[in-house]
Image (spheres, grey):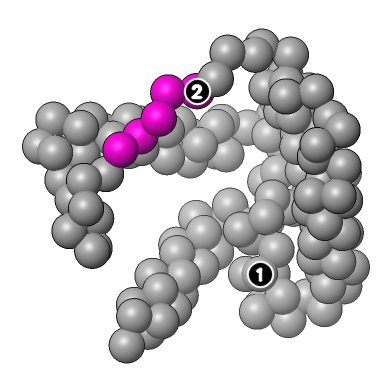
Amino acid sequence: MKIIKYLLVGFVFGIVLTKSEAVSWYRIYEMFQFQSFHMYGIIMTAVVTGVIGIQIIKRNKIKDIKGLPIEIADKEPGNARYWIGGILFGLGWALVGACPGPIYILIGAGFWSVFIVLFGALLGTYLYGVFKDKLPH
């Protein structure tokens, strides 16, 4: 039963991203060329929504689905890793034209060539797991 909830949320999320054109390669291209505010507006809306949600969770001491308190740990110090990770993520996003969430949406919309992107994302994640202990954290 729990999986149905997750599938429903994912389905609605996919519709919202598709209708807002957040999965459009042209919108992503415009964003990286600084030609349009559209994607920046979507991202800022997500950030503001996340900040408000986190504050509600912290101030009201909301519990998770199992009844345990939600604890959000502070980020570890380390400026370089966030810059390097952000640059790599941004370069991948710019080159491919999709971040991880829309990959599945694009496949669901029938863009079969995005399976290559999914394979690359999964391979990168696997390689990170392999080399994680050797990387500076």
Q: Where is residue 22 in the image (x, y as percent from the top left)?
A: 58, 52
Q: Which mark is residue 104?
A: 1
Q: Quadrant of the N terminus?
A: bottom left
Write down the quadrant of residue 40 in the picture: top right
Q: Nearer the viewer, residue 56 or 107?
A: 56
**Label 2 sits on what residue type?**
Lys
Quarter of the C terminus within the rendering: top right
Q: How far apart are marks 1 and 2 (CA)?
A: 28 Å
**Kind of residue at disc 1:** Tyr
Q: What element carries label 1?
A: helix
Q: Say which label, 1 or 2, has the lower sequence index.
A: 2
Q: Residue 92 carries which label?
A: none
SS assignment at label 2:
loop
Assess whether residue 108 is covered by the magenta stretch: no
Location of mark 2 (residue): 75
User: In the image, what residue occupies the spot 70% across and 43% down?
Assistant: 28
Most prominent secondary structure in the magenta stretch? loop
**Looking at the rendering, which quadrant does residue 5 occupy?**
bottom left
Q: What stretch is highlighted in magenta?
A: 71-75
Q: Residue furthest front?
A: 133
What residue is drawn where x is 83% and y is 72%? 115
| Residue drawn at (82%, 78%) of the image | 112
| Residue 124 left/right relative to 65 | right
Residue 105 point in image, percent of width and height:
62, 69
Q: Residue 46: x, y in percent? A: 42, 40
- Rendered position, 94 above or below 20: above
